[in-house]
Image: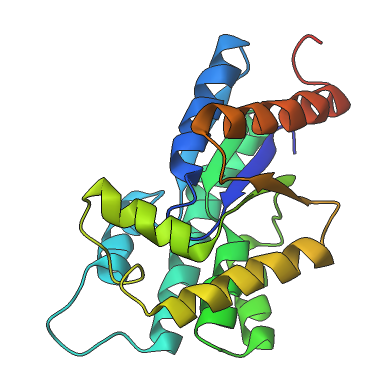
Amino acid sequence: MKGKLIVFEGVEGCGKTTQMQLCCEWLQSLSIPVVTTREPGGTELGLNLRSLLLENSKDKAISPTTELLLYAADRSQHVEQELLPNLELGKIILCDRYIDSTIAYQGYGRNLDMNLIHQLNSIATSGLKSDLTLWLDLDVEVGMARKRKSGEKADRIEQEKIEFHRRVQKGYKEQAVLSPERTLKIEAGLISEQVQKQIQQILTSKLEEWGIGNW
């Protein structure tokens, strides 16, 4: 692949979406071709799946296995329609959530079979892994407090009990240990400018290593 896939991960309220946008603006200022996307919802089909997955339903709840399969469907479409074509064009892709989210939320959070999750991720991604995953590490209680303070209506996942979110955080921690060459921890409890500084320092080194930009 000519381009690079950089994923932003973390628990609710960690600030990944904001930091990803700031990172995009920084890369654009360096004249580096960059696109931003997200999961779920990075395609037209994905937007419909995102609505199903995150909106609160007055009807029967989505079962954990159905939830897992819907995320896999979103990812498969996303990889084929957005990620692979943009990587072939040599673009830097900044993606809000990817396979680590499924492992953390459906594996650790929902306690679904991890072998099944790995199989589905492999099928949905056609083997595409991130070149770099930035894990914005933040205490779960702090993240949830941030979400409440924002005044935004909590989605279906955000409304889960705190124990669920603690299991998700454990999932991220263990993944970072298992893949230190790919997953780098960002201290997300600092002010936004300091968090962005960490990200830019890491990316400056990575871009130089990849031979992208003028350094």
Is residue 131 depicted above or below 36 in this figure? below
Residue 30 location, x and y as percent?
Answer: 63, 11
Q: Quadrant of the N terminus?
A: top right
Please tell me in which quadrant of the rendered image residue 145 appears.
Answer: bottom left
Q: Is residue 133 visible?
A: no
Residue 109 location, x and y as percent?
Answer: 52, 80
Residue 190 location, x and y as percent?
Answer: 57, 39
Please tell me in which quadrant of the rendered image residue 117 appears.
Answer: bottom right
Residue sitting at x 39%, y 61%? 144
Is residue 206 depicted above or below 179 in this figure? above
Answer with left or right where residue 84 lies relative to residue 115: left
Is residue 16 depicted above or below 48 in this figure? above
In front: 14, or 55? Answer: 14
Q: Is residue 147 visible?
A: yes
Residue 60 location, x and y as percent?
Answer: 20, 90
Answer with left or right where residue 119 lies relative to residue 167: right
Q: How many marks?
A: 0
Residue sitting at x 57%, y 57%? 98
Q: Quadrant of the C terminus?
A: top right
